[in-house]
Image (tube, rainbow, N blue to C red):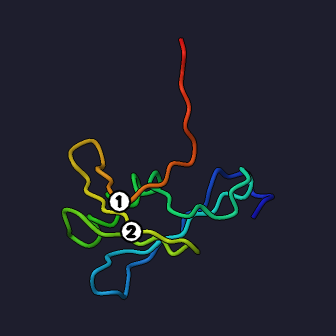
């Protein structure tokens, strides 16, 4: 996968778990991320796609990485609302 000139690959499927609508995994080894633990940004596309496919206004997604995580997704007009537990990976300050 490291040789593919893509920014990332997202795999997704409808879930078999009763309280989870979809599952996903996200890989981006060409950018040094073998597998993203929980990728909120990919759900900006997954949310509208799966909500339409499942005829739902919002959905619950589970990322199936080693650490895993649950993401709540709700497309709303021209944006997608995303919620869930978060971990600070980088912190900084921009001085202009």
Q: Give the CA separation, mark 2 to mark 1.
A: 6 Å
Percent position (x, y) of residue 81? 28, 50
Identify the disc placed on residue 70: 2
Q: Quadrant of the N terminus?
A: bottom right
Q: What residue is shown at x 51% (from left), y 48% (from top)?
A: 88
Label 1 SS:
loop
From this viewpoint, which residue is outermost toward the right? 3
Nearest to the observer: residue 43 or residue 78: 43
Q: What residue is shown at x 21% (from left), y 44% (from top)?
A: 77
Mark 2–mark 1 CB contact (< 8 Å): yes
Percent position (x, y) of residue 83? 32, 55
The answer to whether 71 appears left or right of 29 in the picture is left
Label 2 SS:
strand
Q: What residue is shown at x 35% (from left), y 59% (from top)?
A: 84
Identify the disc placed on residue 84: 1
Percent position (x, y) of residue 61? 37, 69
**Pointer 2 or 1: first along the chain:** 2
- Please identify the quarter of the rendering in which residue 17 is found: bottom left
Q: Residues within 10 Å of mark 2 (few under 14, many from 20)?
A: some
Nearest to the observer: residue 31 or residue 71: 71
- Please identify the quarter of the rendering in which residue 35 is found: bottom right
Residue 59 in the image: above or below residue 29: below
The answer to whether 32 appears left or right of 94 in the picture is right
């Amino acid at each position: 996968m490291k040789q593919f000139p893509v920014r990332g690959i997202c795999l997704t499927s409808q879930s078999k778990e009763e309280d989870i609508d979809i599952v996903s995994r996200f890989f981006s080894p060409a950018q040094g991320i073998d597998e993203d633990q929980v990728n909120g940004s990919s759900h900006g596309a997954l949310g509208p796609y799966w909500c339409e496919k499942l005829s739902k206004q919002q959905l619950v997604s589970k990322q199936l990485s080693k650490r895993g995580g649950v993401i709540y997704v709700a497309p709303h007009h021209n944006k997608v609302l995303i919620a869930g537990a978060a971990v600070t990976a980088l912190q900084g300050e921009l001085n202009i």
